[in-house]
Image (cartoon, rainbow, N blue to C red):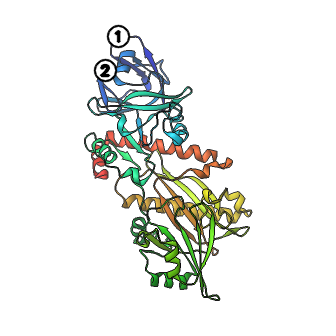
Amino acid sequence: MTDIYSINISNSKDNIVYLPLTTRTNNEINTISFGTINRSCEVRYLPELKDYIVIPEQLCKDLQLPSDGKTHLIFHDQTLHLGPLIGIFTAGFTESPLRPIGERSIFFAKFLSLDQSIGLFTFVFGAHHIDWENGTVEGFTHGKNGWKKSRFPFPNVVYDRLPNRRIENHQALKLVKKRLTEEYSIPWYNPGFFNKWSVHQLLIHDSKVAKYLPDTIQKPTISQMEEMLSTYQNIYLKPVNGSLGLGVFQLMYSREENTYYSRYRDDHEINRLRKYPSLEHFLKVAFKDRLLSSYLAQQGIKLIRLEGKAIDFRIHTNKDEHGNWKITALAAKVAGKGSVTTHLNNGGVVKTLEEIYEDPQKRLKAFHDLTEAAISLSESIDSKITGFIGEIGFDFGIDQEGRVWMFEANSKPGRSIFSHPELKDADLLSRKSSLQYGYYLTKKAIFYPEDIINEEA
């Protein structure tokens, strides 16, 4: 029996929906639902239908259901739920018909283009596309003919893809989330950017994963930095709410020269190495426009290297259609020349494990250790943070003794690693999984609505 069914439209004037005999349930179905719209209907079962269903044209219009498409069938009580319908919430819309979401239009088009292959309907929308009075959304879809605007019911679930913290904190956008989750009980997944210190504090008390965390201090003082440099020889200063490696400093101390060195990327995007006679002098020069109180100091790790350049690893984890964590992508990033981080915009290069490890046994051990760490950390973060987390991007390091360290966890991971030709399948898997988690949450909201309310509270 298939899990996904094509939708055929009939010219019938009645409200009869025809379904394959194999889908018959014990309950008599008298309601059909798409997103948050319900309509009365009669259901009949036909043995000749195998992988499609038949819906009258008018009923299709009443439901605001796209007239061509594929869907899951979810039966609960006396209702047949079609879809699910997933709304991808973002900001930064433009007037361009070719690039309605600006530079990120291609990113969203990739998500929208695969929905039908997994029996889902998706659209992208912003706060200004919502018609609260009629309970509809004017959303963007993307298909063979490019971008199209269509009217949809409120979705079954919302996938949060707001681009940055500043926009996320906008009051109007917070209000949208509050109304959809509280008034309509719509699950909202991947809300919020992680705060590095908050995540560290949550994990440091979990004995299963604390071993992966480097020594980290919030709002470090000069004496604390001196002490860390004495212990570890080098430390990293990172903005608590930073991303993309921006504003990161590597600080080193040379005992022989009694001198401090700092590696960083300047405002002109040039990698710099500077020398300072004292920590006070470094802070006076480097932090004249910054607040040390908004930074973390983190233990430097002697990472494994390729041709003398430091390597770290990016792992994407996603929840699947069963709500379980899985690895969807794993890649190495090799630091650019003189770079403080391995980010691609700092000259970093993406490599596969095969390109890093020639020895199959070493490669297998690295894969096992990294994936074990990623799943354990995903489960730990998920159990400690309120709301629905569907994906996490981790930055890991492996030191020269083979120990795994977690440097960062990102709730809205970038996708730059997928530029590598060998990671095309991983790119597709991670995108599919992000939407399939929406299917899982839809079923949860239908069958166990009280769980949705409790988890989002």
Rendering coords of residue 427 (x, y %): 58, 46
Determine the residue positioned at 40% across, 25% down.
65
Determine the residue positioned at 73% across, 64% down.
359
Please state which of residues 180 and 273 is positioned toward the viewer in this rendering.
273
Please state which of residues 137 and 253 is positioned toward the viewer in this rendering.
253
Q: Looking at the image, how many numbered discs can be counted on the residues?
A: 2
* Tag 2: amino acid: Cys
Please state which of residues 105 and 210 is positioned toward the viewer in this rendering.
105
* Tag 1: amino acid: Lys
Determine the residue positioned at 49% across, 35% down.
100
Earlier sequence position, callout 2 versus callout 1: 1
Whether pointer 2 and pointer 1 mark residues with C-beta atoms closer than 8 Å, the reply is: no
Q: Is residue 193 above or below residue 213?
A: above
Query: Is any atom of residue 448 visible in this view?
Result: no
Q: Secondary structure at mark 2?
A: loop
Query: Is any atom of residue 375 visible in this view?
Result: yes
- Compared across the picture, whether 300 is left or right of 125 comes to right
Q: Which mark, by number, is residue 115?
A: none
Rendering coords of residue 134 (x, y %): 28, 29
- Compared across the picture, whether 148 is left or right of 271 comes to left
Q: Residues within 10 Å of mark 1 (few under 14, many from 20)?
A: few
- Compared across the picture, whether 38 is left or right of 394 comes to left
What is the quadrant of residue 77 in the picture? top left
Q: Secondary structure at mark 1?
A: loop
User: Alpha-carbon distance for marks 2 and 1?
Assistant: 12 Å
Q: Which residue is mark 1?
A: 13
Q: Which mark, by number, is residue 41?
A: 2
* Front position among marks 2 and 1: 1
Rendering coords of residue 36 (x, y %): 32, 32
Rendering coords of residue 284 (x, y %): 49, 77
Q: Residues within 10 Å of mark 2 (few under 14, many from 20)?
A: some
Q: Is residue 278 above or below residue 91?
A: below
